[in-house]
Image (cartoon, rainbow, N blue to C red):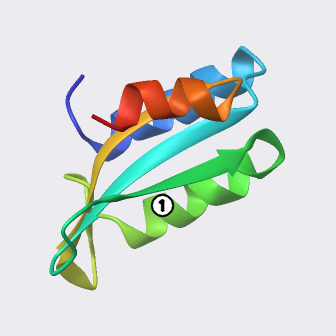
């Protein structure tokens, strides 16, 4: 799947429709050797995606600093599912 803000929105929407517990977002930051994984709970999906849409460009780079970029996202019902998809 192409890494775009529209596909991130689709991920949040589908996770909500399927009543998934979590959406995981993988973020690469300049100067850090490993990315961080942020796990968003279902109850926060709407407000968290609103934040991402406001803060990130269409190509998922942070609007205020292009050294931060979302490099993956997925949904799941456990931390293990998120880890399996995002930590390689």
The residue at which mark 1 appears reads as 52
- The crowd level at tag 1 (other Cα within 10 Å; few <14, some 14-19, many 20+) is some
Q: Is residue 72 left or right of residue 65?
A: right
Give the residue displayed 48% in from the left and 34% down from the top: 83
Q: Quadrant of residue 65?
A: bottom left
Quadrant housing the N terminus = top left
Where residue 9 sits in the image (x, y, percent)? Answer: 48, 38
Q: Residue 1, relative to residue 8: is it above or below?
A: above
Residue at the limit of the structure toward the top, as seen here: 18
The number of numbered badges drawn on the structure is 1
Q: Is residue 60 left or right of residue 53?
A: left
Residue 1 in sight from this viewpoint? yes
Where residue 30 sits in the image (x, y, percent)? Answer: 16, 77
Residue 75 in sight from this viewpoint? no
Residue sitting nearer the eye, 44 or 53: 44
- SS for callout 1: helix
Q: Is residue 9 left or right of residue 43?
A: left
Q: Quadrant of residue 18?
A: top right
Give the residue displayed 63% in from the left and 35% down from the top: 79
Give the residue displayed 59% in from the left and 38% down from the top: 23
Quadrant housing the C terminus = top left
């Amino acid at each position: 799947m192409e890494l775009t803000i529209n596909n991130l929105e689709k991920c949040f929407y589908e996770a909500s429709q399927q009543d998934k517990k979590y959406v995981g977002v993988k973020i690469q930051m300049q100067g850090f050797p490993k990315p961080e994984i942020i796990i968003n709970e279902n109850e926060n999906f709407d407000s968290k995606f609103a934040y991402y849409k406001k803060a990130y460009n269409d190509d998922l780079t942070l609007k205020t600093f292009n050294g931060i970029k979302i490099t993956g996202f997925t949904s799941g019902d456990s931390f293990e599912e998120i880890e399996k998809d995002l930590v390689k």
